[in-house]
Amino acid sequence: MSKSYWVSTYREVKDAEKLAAYAKLAGPALTAAGGRFLARGEPSMTYELGLKERTVLLEFDSVDQAAAAHDSPAYQAALAALGDGADRDIRIIEGV
C-alpha cells in the first residue's frame, strides 16, 4: 500500500482561541492514530495562484489509516472544539 498524505489549508481563522483548543486535541489524536507531521505553518514562498495560508501536512501509512484518524472519536472531539473557528480544506491524497 502507498503512503497517504493529509493536507489541510486554512482559508480563514475566525477565532484564535477555538483554533488553539482544536490544536491541543488534534495533534495528539492524529499522532496516536499513526499520523506523522511533516510540515505546518505558513508557506515560505508561493507561486502562480498560491495563497499565503497556513498549511498542515501529515503522512499516514495508507488512505484507510488517514480516514480512520479523521473519523476517530479523539479527532472528532478536536473538530467539536474548533467548531466555526476556522474555514479549512482537508484532503487525503494517496502517495505515488
Image: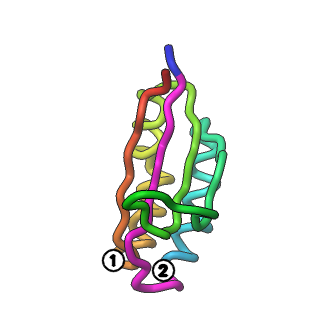
Q: Which residue is drawn at 58% across and 67% down?
A: 42
Could you tell me residue 93's position as x and y percent? Answer: 41, 35
| 11 in magenta | yes
Q: Which residue is drawn at 43% across and 28% down?
A: 94
Which is nearer the eye, 35 or 94? 94
Residue 78 or residue 53, whichever sits in front = 53
Residue span colored magenta: 3-18
Say few, some or many: other residues with alpha carbon within 10 Å of mark 1 (under 14 / 14 to 19 / 20 or more). Answer: few
Numbered-mark total: 2
Q: Give the dominant element type of the magenta stretch: helix, strand or loop.
A: strand
Q: Which picture quadrant has residue 34?
A: top right
| Tag 2 and tag 1, C-beta contact below 8 Å | yes
Identify which amino acid the numbered label 1 is placed on.
Asp
User: How much space separates mark 2 and mark 1, taking CA atoms?
Assistant: 8 Å
- Residue lying furthest front in this view? 48
Type of residue at label 2?
Lys
Q: Position of residue 10 (x, y in %)?
A: 43, 67
Residue 80 is left or right of residue 96, and the answer is left
Q: Which mark is residue 1?
A: none
Q: Residue at x 63, y 63 (%)?
A: 44
Q: Is mark 2 on a helix, strand or loop?
A: helix
Query: Can you tell which quarter of the image residue 80 is in?
Result: bottom left
Residue on which disc 2 sits: 18
The quadrant holding residue 43 is: bottom right
Question: Crowding near pointer 2: few (<14 within 10 Å), some, many (20+)?
Answer: many
- Most extreme residue toward the top is 1
Is 14 magenta? The answer is yes
Task: Provide residue 87's location: percent of width, then percent of height.
Answer: 34, 71
Where residue 12 appears, as percent x and y from the top left, is: 39, 77
Q: Which of marks 2 and 1 is nearer the N terminus?
A: 2
- Residue under label 1: 84
Under circle 1, the secondary element is: loop
